Image (cartoon, rainbow, N blue to C red):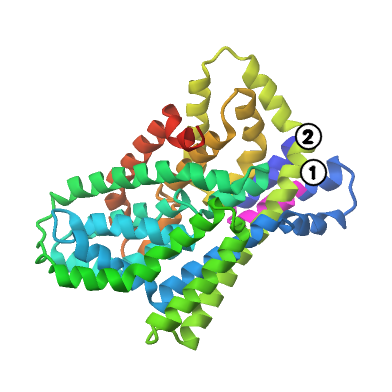
Amino acid sequence: MLVVGFFIFILLLVIGAPIWLALAMSGGFWVYVQMGLPLVSIPSQFFIATDAWILLAVPYFLLAGNLMTYMGPANKMFKFIKNLVGHLPGGMTAAVVVTAAIFGALSGSSVATVVAVGSMAIPQMIKMGYSKENSYGVIAASGTLGQMIPPSIFMILFAATTQLDPGQLFLAGIAPGIFMSIVLIIVAIVVSFRDKTERPQKSSLNETFHSFLHAIPSLLMPVIILGGIYGGIFTPTEAAAIAVCYVLIISFLFNRKDCTIPNFKKSLINTMITTAVIYILLGGAKLFSTAMTYLQVPQILTEFVTNIQVADWIIMLLIILLFLFFGMFLDAIPILYITLPILYPVVLSLGYDPIHFAIITVASLMIGQITPPVGSSLYAISGHFKENMGVVVRGSYPYLVGLIVATLVILYVPWLSIFLFQ
């Protein structure tokens, strides 16, 4: 029966069925046939999967990010960063990485980040002489940084699955997120030397100062959210709701031109669509993982791994390679819910810190978002700007290498992930 269930899963993926349906059908088969539970228990698993307080943070953070995009605050943030470093060699690409890292953390969506930041930056970059490949590549790669820099949707979902404290995961992601941002900035500057770009005139001190004043409300948002969480003032879920209120207030006070009902509706619609996708994936993954646990797949794999004579670091490297392989064909959230119930017990049996493993997992999933042929960030760039996929993929290769190197450093230098707890 185990083989039949996996056959159903793979067959549905091959014929192009939605991933949530493939998970639900194979998991439902095991639940009904192998476990002997009634069919009525199958839809109940969908509700159980979303019945967690921490998961309420997901739609709130998504809404906050969409409001930042459509209501104007994101534009002011990008303008300040561009005025600050845009005149330096490769400065425009560095400004893109920093803006995408901040915006991605607030939006919780790589696709939303590449579209929002790309719409602001790519026309200016191409006009300045940056190649299309480099412009698209740096946007696609830096759009993934928000999954590492807190507050992160991936970390919220990881915490909900493993019962870890999301606040600790947020804290652990700060240093690796900054490190990965620096790596991408270095790659961006090196790649930009190949482009014959026009270096814009350095913004005057007065212009930079005024853009900074306009960007202060946007730049304060991460400080308020993370400061409130770590100060014990509110929980991550409450912080997400406060983020929405904060963006609405600063948009109304400082961005009256963009603070309109149509833009508010766009924010709500995009948030509802993304939330619905995540939640229905949760339901399908819950069926799948429940069956995996009943069939003792995690226990069997754990026993196998602990009995083989292989160094722990090799096993961890193989786990990263597994994430990267799945990232070529699946989106990040299905990968998380398919692999985590199986791999998490294995990693714990090896004696690895669960928080360190969470950071490694998030870093690996980030890479999958710019890995062809099914990188979500690549498709977002190609579709939104109506550009040939080959151009986007070629541009992303240097940044893909940078992210892989950064992930290996995080794996073998666990201090980066846990030093804030020491």
> Residue at position x 36%, y 46% from top?
178
Q: Secondary structure at mark 1?
A: helix
Q: Which mark is residue 30?
A: 1
Q: Would residue 257 appear left or right of 16 to someone viewing this image? A: left
Task: Tell me, yes or no, whether the highlighted magenta stretch contains residue 406.
Answer: no
Residue 18 among those drawn in magenta: yes
Q: Which residues are magenta?
A: 14-27
In the image, residue 138 above or below residue 66? above
Dot 1 and dot 2 residues touching (CB under 8 Å): yes
Determine whether, in the image, residue 313 is placed left or right of residue 254.
right
Badge 2 crowding class, 10 Å Cα cut-off, few under 14, some 14 to 19, many 20 or more, is some
* Amino acid type, label 2: Leu
Horizontal and vertical percent for residue 105?
A: 45, 57
- Closest to the observer, 84 or 39: 84
Q: Secondary structure at mark 2?
A: loop
> In 3D space, how far apart are the residues under numbered discs 1 and 2 (Cα atoms)?
9 Å
Residue at 47% across, 39% down: 324
| Front one among 371 and 4 | 371
* Residue 295 tag number: 2
Q: Earlier in the sequence, mark 1 or mark 2?
A: 1
Q: What secondary structure is the magenta-colored segment mainly?
A: helix
Tally of numbered tags: 2
Where 133 sits versus 412, above or below? below
Quadrant for the N terminus, please: top right
